Image (tube, rainbow, N blue to C red):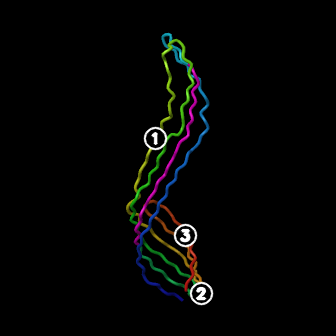
Amino acid sequence: LLKWRGISVGSGLYFQGNSVKLTLEYDEVPSQTITYSEAGFDLSGDLTIDPDVEMSIDLFTTTIPLEIVTSVRLLWVLNIYMGLGVDFNFGYSELKLKSAGDVIFSPTITGDPGATVTPGRLAVAATNEQAPDFVTPRFMFGLGLNLGPVVALNADVVYYFATKGVSLGLSFGLIW
């Protein structure tokens, strides 16, 4: 009716890498009329800003999990398991934002024939780099359903203490 399945100690090696690049396109800021006057020098014109932003996210992690798990089988059908683990994490994540829009100024200059206006570019740049937490302890719990020697269905819950994160999983397996 009840069988203790023993203690299992396990480890492994996981690699994960992601890279995403996209452009966030916004509506142009409505054109503004600018006027400037000083000692016989007059400047006026329309200023338009295109606020598009390019964003990229790069992520690479290597994880070495270490866990200890025990389980109990009830009535040959239900397997209840729980354990503790810790993940050792290495890697980086990087977020970059960069402006991709132009500043357009169409000037009219009077009073100084040698004056010129050079169009500009909207300059925004931001970078944030961060390494993962080196150690992330966790608690694991799950239920497994054994339907004879052929099929196994498992539902897993993993709770990460440090980040208060939860991972839910469902797996199906064939046993032969």
What quarter of the picture does the N terminus occupy? bottom right
Q: CA distance from mark 3 to mark 1?
A: 39 Å
Label number found at residue 148: 2
Question: Whole-percent x and y of residue 87?
Answer: 41, 66
Under circle 2, the secondary element is loop
Q: Residue at x 42, y 80 (%)?
A: 8
Under circle 3, the secondary element is strand
Label number found at residue 125: 1
Q: Out of 162 and 27, give the one closest to the viewer.
A: 27
Give the answer, above or below, for where 172 lies relative to 107. below
Magenta stretch bounds:
44-66
Horizontal relation, residue 77 to residue 4: left or right: right
Under circle 1, the secondary element is strand
> Contact (CB < 8 A) between labels 3 and 2?
no
Horizontal relation, residue 50 to residue 13: left or right: right
Q: Pointer 3: what residue? A: 169
Marked residue nearer the N-terminal end (3 or 1): 1
Question: Whole-percent x and y of residue 147?
Answer: 60, 84
Label 3 Cα neighbours within 10 Å, binned few <14 / some 14-19 / many ≥20? few
